[in-house]
Amino acid sequence: MTYTLTRRALMQGAAAMALMLAGMLAPQAALAETQLRMAVPDPAESSVGRAATRFAALVAEKTSGEVVIQVFPDGILYGKDQNAAINQLGSGALDGLILATSVYASFEPKMNAVSLPYLFSDYDQLQAYLAGAPGQELLTSMERLNIKGLGFFLRTFRNVTTRETAITTADGFAGLNLRTPNNPLFVSLFQALGANPTPMAFSEVYSALQLKAIDGQENPVEVPFNNRLYEVQGHLNITQHLADSFLVALSSAAWQKIPADHHDAVQAAASEMIAEQDAQEIAQEAEIIEKLKAAGMQVNLLADGELEKIQTVARGIYPQFEEQITPEFMQKSIDFVSQ
């Protein structure tokens, strides 16, 4: 008898495995003084899944097992609706969450500063920003949402993948139907570049690409690799158009459940994981690009002088978001990277 393994079956199997692993952790959790559940949007073996698992291990180690965090991948705790996840975190229905700052921007517009196109020239700048005064101000801004931000780890810069079009010039975006997150900054960027941005839940992207409802999407390179988008995309275009990061957060209610004498240990666990994760993300980017090549994708670089043209167009949208981000914080962000 022959069985056909579908993409849906694989996803269901992964969710079942996550629940089984959670059950295996139950005896350990039963012995803990504080038991928390942390949600992540991607598979357990993804970058964010590994980060959450490492954070949980460090928390258990640094609290001598008195605080135990169980990790649930693939958005199964919040029905894969990332905006709902943030609402649930703020209400205390979720204990913990690792999610992109670009999603949080719908709730705290200052988060858009992280994703201002071509704000950061390299990863050193991005790390310094997230760990420095601007990042601390963003963490503090979460308090009004009843969320305790523990820190940010970087994502590698975002690039555009396309089915048939090689983007090597500023004009290469013209007329392309590109999926973006449901974030006005992303939409405005690609409109300015001449594309047709299509906000869409990421859970729908593979099917939309397969059905040719859209021509491409944009994400850090690990996303098309981990989600097998190379099956429906022929080109990886190294545009590096904007940055993003993951916020490691607990609900204020969960933070208060943790005994006060363990707060420093949990914060230290987050800081240690973030330092490790940043180094791994940067080191693995080139490896993932080679894996995408091996999977059949053509990797395209921008022609000489074209990056500067794209940057000029992209930075032209900054004034549209000045009031949302606030003029003061936008200027702080620009001044920080100009030092």
Image (cartoon, helix red, strand yellow):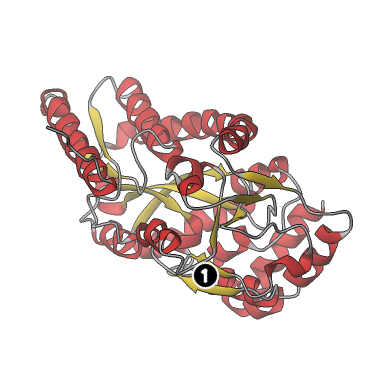
Q: Quadrant of residue 52?
A: top left
Say few, some or many: other residues with alpha carbon within 10 Å of mark 1 (under 14 / 14 to 19 / 20 or more): many
Q: Residue at x 74, y 61 (%)?
A: 334
Q: Nearer the viewer, residue 54 or 19?
A: 19
Q: Nearer the viewer, residue 135 or 221?
A: 221
Which amino acid is tagged 1?
Answer: Pro
Estimate the x, y position of residue 337 in percent, counting from the top left: 76, 53
Q: Nearer the viewer, residue 131 or 234?
A: 234
Estimate the x, y position of residue 95 in percent, counting from the top left: 25, 48
Q: Is residue 234 left or right of residue 246?
A: right
Q: Is residue 47 left or right of residue 17?
A: right
Q: Residue at x 46, y 71 (%)?
A: 199
Estimate the x, y position of residue 206 in percent, counting from the top left: 40, 56
Q: Nearer the viewer, residue 210 or 223?
A: 210
Estimate the x, y position of residue 211 in percent, counting from the top left: 41, 64
Q: Is residue 68 left or right of residue 184?
A: left
Q: Quadrant of residue 324?
A: bottom right
Residue with the mark numbered 1: 109
Residue at the right extreme?
Answer: 305
Image: 127 above or below 85: above
User: Which structural element holds mark 1?
Assistant: helix
Q: Residue at x 26, y 60 (%)?
A: 88
